[in-house]
Amino acid sequence: MGKLPEIIGVRFKSVGKVYSFSPNGKKTKVGDKVIVETSKGVECGEVVLAEKNVDEKSIVAPLKPIIRVATAQDMKTVENNRKKEADAFKICEEKIAKHNLKMKLVDVECTFDNNKLLFYFTAENRVDFRELVKDLASVFRTRIELRQIGVRDEAKMLGGIGVCGQPYCCARFLGEFQPVSIKMAKEQGLSLNPTKISGVCGRLMCCLKYEQDCYTELLKITPKVGAIVRTADGKGTVEAVNLLTGKLTVRMESDAVVTVDKSAVEVIKDGFVRVNKEEMRALKNLEEK
């Protein structure tokens, strides 16, 4: 068996996706800045995963080698690029106002080699920015790219404080967004009030995903709302469920309402966790990116 390929993990934004590169025989450690070639051009990133050997099947081809460990001159270039980005942001906002475009500029990114300026923006509809691109190209004399992003990406780039009082998860530690659905909120017994289950970005809170595996397992062993069960006092229908405590609210055939533990009942016919069509239509936009 041949030697497994060696990789390092490199990140280009403080809380961004981690990409694999070949160390190319160069010694690196976590925290080092390295110069690499990406689909955007030559970039400077930070090593966040130390050298390790991995199965070739787990690598997304092609595995590009790092060009070099960043030098003092490279870091000076990065610093100059940050200043250029700040200037470009102000100029672009002025140009947007001049062309009366209905778009909001969110961020500007200058590639390490100064070969391209990327402008990230949000807009409710499609925007014809061809004249804006020409205007920007005449000012900066480099390739210009405008990218429309979603509200989740905007929140990740700008950061802020969530309803929990903590900095946004997406801006603090989430490298990539995970799919979150209305069904998750329903299975976790949450109110489907948009203000209760959506974040500042106006989309479903990312944290709904964190405990979903636990709720999925609990749902397998807990009678659901609508289930017909047999208790020590006879048959009844489950009207409410507390998945975490395992307590069930059961309406008996005699119309009496009792609270029992799930271990004290026998399920005759289980219920279902359903989100009706009206709820789905009303809340569908919360799932969008």
Image (tube, rainbow, N blue to C red):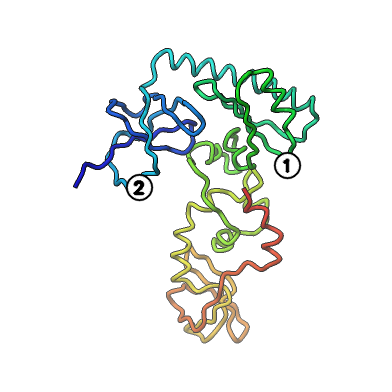
**The one of 261 and 63 positioned closer to us in this rendering:** 63
**x and y percentages locating residue 25 in the rendered image:** 27, 28
Q: What residue type is labelled 1?
A: Arg
**Distance between the Cα atoms at labels 2 and 1?**
37 Å
Q: Does residue 52 appear left or right of residue 178 in this picture?
A: left
x, y percent for residue 124: 73, 42
Give the residue pinned by disc 1. Answer: 126
Residue identified by numbered label 2: 58
How crowded is the residue under tag 2: few (<14 C-alpha within 10 Å), some, or many (20+)? Answer: few
Q: Quarter of the image holding residue 236?
A: bottom right
- Amino acid type indicated by mark 2: Ser
Query: Closer to the camera, 129 or 121?
Result: 129
Q: Decide: marks 2, 1 in contact (CB < 8 A)?
A: no
What SS does tag 1 mark? loop
How many numbered marks are there?
2
Q: Residue at 58%, 77% (x, y): give it.
A: 226
Badge 1: how crowded within 10 Å, few (<14), some, or many (20+)? few
Identify the element where label 2 is drawn.
helix
Q: Give the side of residue 212 with respect to residue 190, left or right.
A: left
Task: Identify the residue at horizontal 53%, vertical 85% (top origin).
Answer: 235
Q: Seen in the image, is 60 located left or right of residue 159?
A: left
- The relative height of residue 217 versus residue 56 in the rendered view (above or below) is below
Residue farthest left in this picture:
1
| Corner quadrant of residue 91 | top right
Q: Residue at x 33, y 49 (%)?
A: 57
In the image, residue 213 sits, relative to residue 20, either above or below, namely below
Compared with 251, 164 (above or below) is above
**Residue 105's spot in the image, x, y percent?**
68, 31
Q: Residue 140 placed where, x, y %?
A: 64, 18
Which circle's residue, 2 or 1, is located before the other in the chain?
2
